[in-house]
Amino acid sequence: MTVMLADGHSMPRLGLGTWPMNDQEAHQAVTNALTLGYRLIDTAASYGNERGVGAAVAETPVAREDLFVTTKLRGSHHGYDAALRGFEASRARLGLDYVDLYLIHWPLPGRGLYTETWRALVHLREQGLVRSIGVSNFTPEHIERVVADTGVWPVVNQIELHPGFPQSGLRAWGADHDIVTESWSPLGAGSKLLNEPVVTEVAAAHGRTPAQVVLRWHLQLGAVPIPKSADPGRTRQNLEVFDFSLSPQDMARLDDLSTGGRIGGDPETYVEL
Ligand code: A2P
């Protein structure tokens, strides 16, 4: 199951998130996920586990062209030259010739360097070192600025998204501009989301787990969820979401869980180095 990006590349509809895993945990979790059938793996320079992800990718019998590896540029590498260096360091840690999707992890608007940084990503794509380029935690205003500067649109915006924080305005804006929304912390990152009565009721009605119902909600919104699990049973369970569907009523009940609250950082103020 894949989604077509605006640049013509296709991306799996669901992937494995790897935060917070160290190299050893990521090596094991990614190896297991690839065996189970995951093809999209999401990491970031700031997670400190690109070597572990790379080790799993080096060892897997899955062909490189069937894998989709995403990593992200950390805040300390904003700026044109710094971004090129940051990318090269990530690529070397991953041990890859190219990365499928490279994202600017946070806009850091206070530093005012994200448009320059975006120009470096455009260059990396032109060089063939990165197949697709996108952003993470960007608002429409941030995206409009990088597009005004370069004429190049990101094909993905990876944002915090779950039924407790459904981001309907940002998702709709992205869809209008051919930007695929990827969901980080799709299960609510260990918050009480999976124990909410609405989630457990819908899950029971479908004979599924709360996590499966929440992942199905993402898929039916058109978003690409990247649930993190270091547990083989839960990793398997999180992939078994393509053989049932939620009704419009189920979707509406889950939408209604919105608490308006973020779990993670606010894009306007969050400083990640
Ligand atoms: P674990 O790694 O022990 O499975 P998110 O992707 O929203 O950040 O959520 C990750 C958190 O949810 C982790 O604590 C992870 O723990 C847990 N988790 C992942 N998959 C499931 C699942 N199917 N059921 C319950 N908890 C899950």
Image: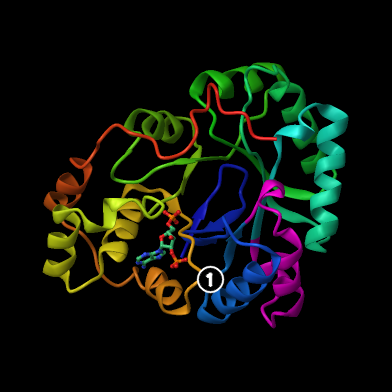
Relative image position of residue 15 (x, y in whole percent): 51, 61
Q: Is residue 150 above or below residue 262?
A: above
Report which residue position mark 1 lands on: 38
120 or 85, nearer to the observer:
85
* Prevailing secondary structure class for the magenta stretch in the rendered image: helix
Q: Name the quadrant of the C terminus.
A: top right
192 or 202, nearer to the observer:
192
Q: Residue at x 23, y 71 (%)?
A: 208
- From where the camera sits, is residue 122 visible? no
Toward which corner of the image does residue 233 lie, by quadrant? bottom left
Judge from the rendering whether residue 168 lies leftward or rightward of residue 153; answer left or right.
left
Relative image position of residue 10 (x, y in whole percent): 57, 56
Q: Residue at x 14, y 55 (%)?
A: 197
Q: Which residues are magenta?
A: 43-68
Is 46 included in the stretch rendered in magenta?
yes
Q: Residue at x 88, y 31 (%)?
A: 81
Circle 1 sits in a helix, a strand or a loop, which is it?
loop
Is 70 included in the stretch rendered in magenta?
no
Q: Amino acid at mark 1?
A: Tyr
Relative image position of residue 164 (x, y in whole percent): 29, 42
